[in-house]
Image (cartoon, rainbow, N blue to C red):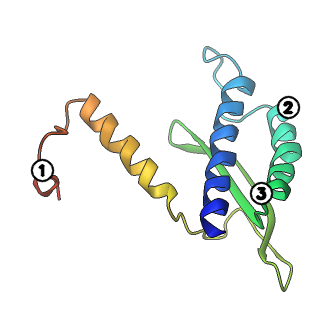
Amino acid sequence: MIKYKVIAAFVIGFFGAAALALYLPDRKIKTHSPSEEFAAFLDFRVPKLMGIYGIPGVNISLVRDGLIVYTAAYGNANQKSGQKITVDMPMRVQSISKSVTAWAVLKLAEEGKLNLEDPAEKYL
């Protein structure tokens, strides 16, 4: 069951990022925050996905050019007490760190900063 919740959380994050690409203004426009339309889309869609997948709470942060441009919290941190999740509440990253690490390694390889054929010990 936990495995499916982690997968569902990843799916929500993935679709949130995909939706971001559709709703952010053209790159030529200098902006540091997503549109109100995109925020409204998240406010509508995220709770629906949480209900479908049985996810008690989600914390979303969008970063652009190293700056946090959007944060939102949905649901509960504690189901029994009803404690709401807040945007500054620490969250466990769980298995998502594996895909983020893989992305970072591939990005470094693309930039020529590491060789995928080298043993991991060379970089640790």
Q: Residues within 10 Å of mark 2 (few under 14, many from 20)?
A: few
Total labels: the figure holds: 3
The residue located at (84%, 37%) in the rendering is 41
Callout 1–callout 3 Cβ contact below 8 Å: no
Place of residue 79 in the rendered image (x, y in percent of width and height, measured from the top left) = 82, 79
Disc nearer the start of the sequence (3/2): 2
Nearer to us in this view, 5 or 89: 5
Q: Which quadrant is home to the N terminus?
A: bottom right
Q: Which residue is mark 1?
A: 119
Badge 1: residue crowd in 10 Å (few <14, some 14–19, many ≥20) = few
Q: Tag 1: residue type? A: Pro
Residue at the spot of label 3: 53
Q: Earlier in the sequence, mark 1 or mark 2?
A: 2
Amino acid type, residue under disc 2 in the picture: Glu
Dot 3 falls on a residue whose secondary structure is: helix
**Which circle, 3 or 2, is nearer the viewer?**
3
Secondary structure beneath label 2: helix
- C-alpha separation, residue under disc 1 versus residue under disc 2: 47 Å
- The secondary element bearing badge 1 is classed as loop
Given this view, does label 1 or label 2 mark the residue nearer the observer? 1
Neighbour tally class for label 3: few under 14, some 14-19, many 20 plus, Cα within 10 Å: some
Q: Earlier in the sequence, mark 1 or mark 3?
A: 3
What label sits on residue 77 in the rendered view?
none
Q: Residue 90: percent from the left, percent from the top?
A: 61, 70
Mark 2 = which residue? Answer: 37
